[in-house]
Amino acid sequence: MNEAPSLEPTGTFVLVKPERKAEQTEGGIYLPELSRDASLYGVITAVGPGKELKGGEVYAPEVRVNDRVLFRTQQAVEVHQGNEVYLLMDSETDLLAVEDEE
């Protein structure tokens, strides 16, 4: 696995490595690109320090590096590192759920 880009997210932003979906089903049917890109799961590779609140207290994101998350892509920014693609997104508005580690 390639290293994540050398980006440090700011505020409540996180860097996510999206999971790739198969291009072909088990039955041999090729999926159109739009269907493959519908994958909304990925793994957090970097987390910003959080948002400073009034009084100097810091509200840190609720996710950690290596968490598997469900996200929406409307506001995500694509970041390319070699052949790898990462998504930079706001942990407060774009992350929908964190998968349990069971």
Image (cartoon, grey):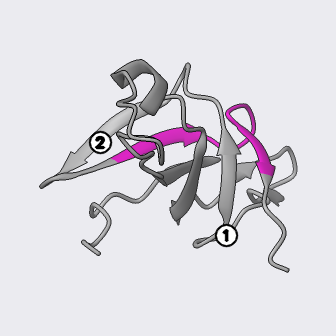
Start and end of the magenta stretch? 86-97
Q: Quick one: 33 or 79, which is closer to the camera?
A: 33
User: Seen in the image, is 8 located left or right of residue 70?
Assistant: left
Q: Amino acid at mark 1?
A: Arg
Picture coordinates of residue 4, whole percent (x, y) = 32, 66
Residue shown at 67% from the left, 69% from the top: 64
Q: Which residue is mark 1?
A: 64
Quarter of the image that includes the C terminus = bottom right
Residue 39 seen? yes
Q: Amino acid at mark 2?
A: Val
Residue 5: name its quadrant. Answer: bottom left
Picture coordinates of residue 69, whole percent (x, y) = 68, 53
Q: Residue furthest bottom?
A: 102
Q: Which residue is mark 2?
A: 79
Label located before the other in sequence (2 or 1): 1
Residue shown at 73% from the left, 31% from the top: 93
Secondary structure under tag 2 reads: strand
CA distance for labels 2 and 1 = 19 Å
Secondary structure under tag 1 reads: loop
Inspect the magenta stretch and tell me whether residue 39 lies in it: no
Quarter of the image that includes the N terminus = bottom left
Residue shown at 84% from the left, 59% from the top: 57
Residue 3: name its quadrant. Answer: bottom left
Residue 56: name its quadrant. Answer: bottom right
Residue 47 seen? no
Q: Quick one: 87 or 53, which is closer to the camera?
A: 87
Q: Which mark is residue 45?
A: none
Residue shown at 42% from the left, 19% from the top: 34
Instruction: Give the overall secondary structure of the magenta segment.
Output: strand
